[in-house]
Amino acid sequence: MSEAILARETNRRQLQQIISGLSDGVMLVEVDQTIIWANEAALLMHGVEEISELGANGEAYRDKFSLRYRNNHPLDVDQYPISRVAAGEVFSDVLIEVSKIGEEEERSWVHRVRSMVLEDSTGTPESLVLILADATEWAGAEQRFEKTFNANPAPAVICRLSDLRFIKVNQGFLEMTGHSRESVIGRSVYEVDVLENAERKDLAIERLNQGATIPQMQAELKLPEGGTKLVIVAGQPLDMNEEDCMLFSFTDLEPRRKAETALRQSEERFAKAFKLTPVPTLVCTADRQQIVEANEAFVSTLGYTPQELIGRTVAELGFIEDGAVMDGLFNVLETTGRVDGLDLKVRKKGSESLDCVLAADTVTIQDNACYLFVLMDITERKRSELELVEAIETVMQDASWFSQTLIEKLANAKRVNTRQLPSASFTDLTARERDVLSLICEGLADKEIAARLNLALNTIRNHVATVYSKLDVHSRAEAIVWARERNLFANQGKGKR
């Protein structure tokens, strides 16, 4: 053996001793692609125990192991690391997925490969070295991140900080914006501007250039079909494939903006209807009964100025004459949220009173619970009814000549439009008092009732007075109305003329 060959073998053994204990895998290859040595770490990264299981040379290695790039594209023969280093190529950070061919249980490893060409003093390649780093766990974590990123419904994109170009986009972002994957990947953050009209855009760009966290802020993304979408955007730096990147995540605010627009439009319509309605209308807070709005009809009907109304409570204003009725009104509103057709007296500014029917409901204005009061002035109607009652009572002082049909029509005409009936009950009357009420409803005078019941006239008058007292009425007409409202004696006297 020549001294040159001996020196080379000595150097190779020394090299093998140095690298045999390294955690990185090391393979020594001849120029003719013969595999001459591999350390234990390299064997473990291929799932074998002996160097012979790697194959004697590059061709045998290709028969035993399938190599693919990370995009799942298989390597051609001349792209295998053994072929490339044998051709004298020096490369680094080549990521490949390695799996054994023909195994029932498919296993794979991810290698990060770089090459070295050791030359002798004359510049002739002496040793070809492949250095393998096990990136299997890293690749698994990246794969899990990839799946999580793509499956996450929250819209997100990732850009490289070195050139500010997008390298990943998930389905959530594509669905939110209408972009296609091809129209995002490879373009810069200024072409697909994720910070469009951001409220603190200068700060966001500064943090982006620093590779620092970008706080949440509102922005408007331009959509490919035109228009914009209101979002909240935030940026988080992260490392991908040992490259500094920025993860942009988004929250779609468009549904909230549409809801706010609809609410604003609804409140504007309510405000217009409130002001233009000719019926007196008032709004007060539910908690303190403090007046917050009154329309022109309310102001003109009650004689107050808006300044005299706004900010005061309903109790302070005192336009509801009866304090007990007012307390009952608010108790019902607090319990049921609404009141329909309540008869009450309303005091105008000064001393004049109005007969009104009130309807009230609960409304929400700018997130505050309020009560809406609507008043209908029935003073003239009440006056007409009273005048009609007086006329009825005048003619009914001698009603013996009235037909039953006419009595019913007069009673119906006298009925007061109210939803709350007196508390008296028909069962409060004695049997004799019921008979007297029945004959009153037939239109008989006291003398005729006395004759019909064979009782003295004074006795009948006493019974009539007791009936009035128990029913809380004051005349024959009111007694007839009371009975008709309760459908009493409906079939009595049919056919009488």
Image (tube, rainbow, N blue to C red):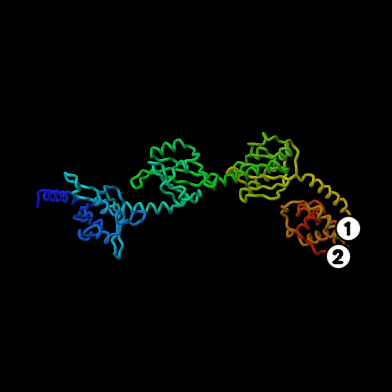
Q: Residue at x 67, y 45 (%)?
A: 373
Q: Nearer the viewer, residue 454 or 270?
A: 270
Q: Is residue 85 left or right of residue 291?
A: left
What residue is disc 1 on? 402
Q: Quote the CA–CA distance across marks 1 and 2.
A: 13 Å
Q: Are marks 1 and 2 in contact (CB under 8 Å)?
A: no
Using residue 157 as the reference point, say whether residue 305 is left or right of it. right
Residue 459 appearing in the image: no
Query: What amino acid is at disc 1?
Result: Phe
- Would residue 279 appear left or right of 492 to someone viewing this image? left
Residue 495 shows which numbered tag? 2
Decide which of 32, 359 is in the foreground and name it: 32
Residue 209 appears in the figure = yes
Residue type of the residue flagged with mark 2: Gly
Of marks 1 and 2, which one's residue comes earlier in the chain? Answer: 1
How far across and how far down the image is residue 437, in percent?
80, 59
